[in-house]
Image (spheres, helix red, strand yellow):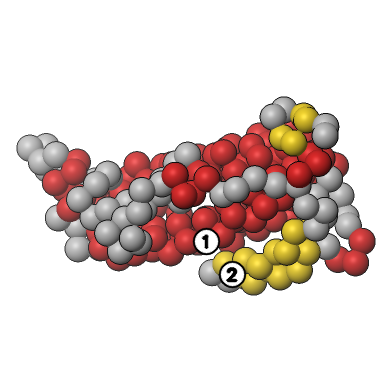
Amino acid sequence: MDTEEGIVMGRAPKTVDVRLKLPMLEIAGSWEPNDAERRAAWELYVELVTRVSVVPMRADEGLLREALTSLYSLFGSTREILRRHGPQIAEPKRDGQYNFGFLAVAMLNYGLRPLLASWHPALEDWESRRPADRSRRDHERAWSEADRLRSALDGTRQVLSAYADLLASACGIPNLLGAIPPGPADG
């Protein structure tokens, strides 16, 4: 079995079923990742499973701003992965199959952008009203929209978890999301 950058290419399936339901787009079909796509998939997978994007954020934990910032940073990470691996991860496939480039850009534009475009300015507006004697945490928790944003973050987490699962399948590895402790509603 050939290994490249820690990925055992021989164990990965030749074809991966793609079923992703994004807020404004549904993607269904198949993907036959080449080795470059598998390496890119591994890099994006690591980015997804190691941040709040797929880790449940309990009501008494974290800051909403930090969650949005973490999700926004996926744009930079994904762009870097796309640039580093070049056009071979976005080459057209036969029979209309998907490629990593399309799947990654769809994740950004349809999985993340709607949440960030809506909630980033709303939270920023609320943050600008924080009194000097109030902590960021207390101010966020006093926001009437905080629960709605947490719910929206959870919906995005589910979308990104499906992406993580797809990327794990493309790499031929078990999904590491099982290493994340379940939240109160999860387990």
Query: Which residue shows up at 59% across the image and 55% down it?
Result: 165
Q: Residues within 10 Å of mark 2 (few under 14, many from 20)?
A: some
- Residue corresponding to mark 2: 21
Instruction: Verify CB contact (< 8 Å) between mark 1 and mark 2.
Output: yes
Query: How far from the left and from the top, in percent, is residue 85?
Result: 77, 35
- In the image, 78: left or right of 125? right
Quadrant of the rendered structure where residue 89 is?
top right
Classify mark 1: residues with Cα within 10 Å, few (<14), some (14-19) or many (20+).
Answer: many
Left or right: residue 171 versus residue 180 is right
Q: According to the image, label 1 marks what residue?
A: 159
The single residue placed furthest to the left in the displayed view is 133
Q: Residue extending furthest top?
A: 5
Q: Is residue 4 left or right of residue 104?
A: right
The amino acid on which the numbered mark 1 sits, given as a three-letter code, is: Val
Judging depth in this view, the residue of 110 and 124 nearest the camera is: 110
Q: Looking at the image, which residue is at 73% across and 64% down?
A: 17
